[in-house]
Amino acid sequence: MREGSCAEIEVVVMRRRSTWLVAIVAVAGLLAAACGADGAPAAPQAPEQADPDTTAVADTTPADPPDQTDQAAQSQASSPPDEQQVDQPPPPQQSDEQTKPDPAPADDAETSDSFDSPALTPPPLGESDLLRPQFLFLPPDATLTPSGAPILRGPTDAPVGRPWQTNWDVRLAPPEEFIAVLPRDAILSLDAPRYDDIATAGIWLTAGHPVIQIEINGDARAFPLGIMSKHEIVNTEIGGLAVAVTFCPLCNSAIAFQRILEGEIVTFGVSGMLRNSDLVMWDRTTQTLWQQLTGEALVGAMVGMKLDLLSAPIVSWAQFRTAFPNGLVLSQNTGFLARYDLNSYVGYDSAGPYAQFFSDETDPRLLANARVAAVDLNDQRVAYAFDLLAHERVLHDTVGGQEIVIVWTPGAVSALDRNSIADSANVGASGVFLRSLDDRLLTFAPNPDDPATFLDTETNSVWDIFGRAVAGELQGSQLQAVVHGNHFWFAWAAFFPDTELVRLDA
């Protein structure tokens, strides 16, 4: 494993005005270290610990900084500090109205075809509210979670200090598994996101740009990874449902959850901690810590709970705009200064996990940063290597007693390869679906005339990457999606070491 690097510098300065001069000096020092006399980036080097006075933080309440390791401090998207970060002004004001056209463009590049998200976020609860009985998911004497995982109890040394109020006396993982890299909310989630229509988003998105696709109750949304890699969490509403859309660039894990705890809508933020190189989230109501890749409560009042996962495949922008011409796209008008068409993790696809964030041995069955279509059905876990999917394009399997089909199409590029996402490697997209339709089991094959679609052998109908029949006898039909992820192998295997791997024979 090699340590991380990046070819560009973006330094976030959000401290008080009295620290601006210090920040400017720090920026100059970083630029001098990273660039030669001609301004070209220097050779990759191991990241260094960030100065807490120049680290991006949104919470300016005076407090002792959280403990940090001697390893690299993360960037705007959990990356080392010599990577690009986002120059962030104060977060935008949340809309008080339902989705509506934006009355005025934010800049010359955008039109008025922009939409605000509904205001579903409740105000944070006070310290006393954190102890309300309805925010204790399990009885105080519970020793096991509903899934049978042992609960660790008792005082312990937390890896973070003030202003956290998380109850570390109830946990599923020991504190030493958490790496505190940045202060809480140093990477700012988008809590009042704006959306563009297809035409407006097409001004900056290229055909292969990877997007997270979510459709709920006919409401189709796309979340470009160029934006998600810099903010990691979007608290939003889709089809009338409160949703958290998340992306951990260090694991290539795109996952969406219902953001409802015990009947109450909550918002999630970036804790600044990692576990197995994966994003650790926190909810602002109970201050419970959550594992992004699994949706499981790790530490605090909600230990024992797992968030409800939603289907959130990564596809190309071209695939989304073709399938959903009336869909909405997360706007680059976020209120932050950033180049969302650029990648802050140049070369990460081939670098393997950063050693300072993942110290365990990687599962040798596959290259660490190989992509897999990972499925968890009825407690049976299977990962399908992307190189196999690209070779076969269609696979049938039985997982957890369910007959499924796994499909792959070219077109989507990596968000973690070259500096310009548009110039990055074509890694493709996967889809996983139940094969049964109206009590009829379908068999699928690649479409020899179109690499973007598939055929069923029963009716010769044409199907797309979203499981929709777009032509033929079954046109208009929809296969049931199976929640899956296009994760890096090392990350999936770290959380599910007993997973079955399906790959090309050596």
Image (tube, helix red, strand yellow):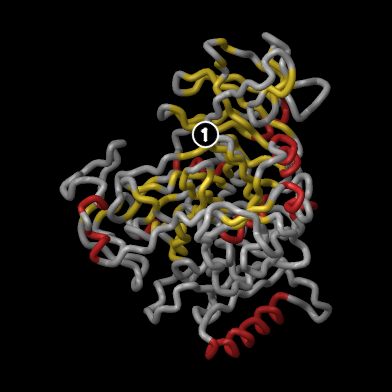
Quarter of the rendering containing residue 467: top right
Left or right of residue 471: residue 188: left
Q: Position of residue 37 (x, y in %)?
A: 81, 81
Residue 366 visible in the picture: no
Q: Residue at x 41, y 29 (%)?
A: 379
Residue 232: name its quadrant: bottom right
Q: Quadrant of the rendered structure where residue 9 is? A: bottom right
Residue 43 in the image, given as x and y percentages of width and height: 73, 69
Residue 392: % across, % down: 70, 24
Count of numbered circles on the image:
1
Residue under pointer 1: 483
Tell me if 439 is positioned left or right of 133 in this view.
right
- Between 339 and 85, which is closer to the camera in this rendering? 339
What is the secondary structure assignment of the residue under circle 1? loop
Q: Quadrant of the C terminus?
A: top right
| Vertical comparison of 212 with 42: above or below | above
Q: Residue at x 30, y 50 (%)?
A: 302
Q: Quadrant of the N terminus?
A: bottom right
Left or right side of 407 for 142: left
The spot of residue 412 in percent (x, y) is 72, 42
Q: Against 30, is 389 above or below?
A: above
Residue at 62% in and 29% down: 503
Left or right: 143 in relation to 207: left
Amino acid type at circle 1 is Val
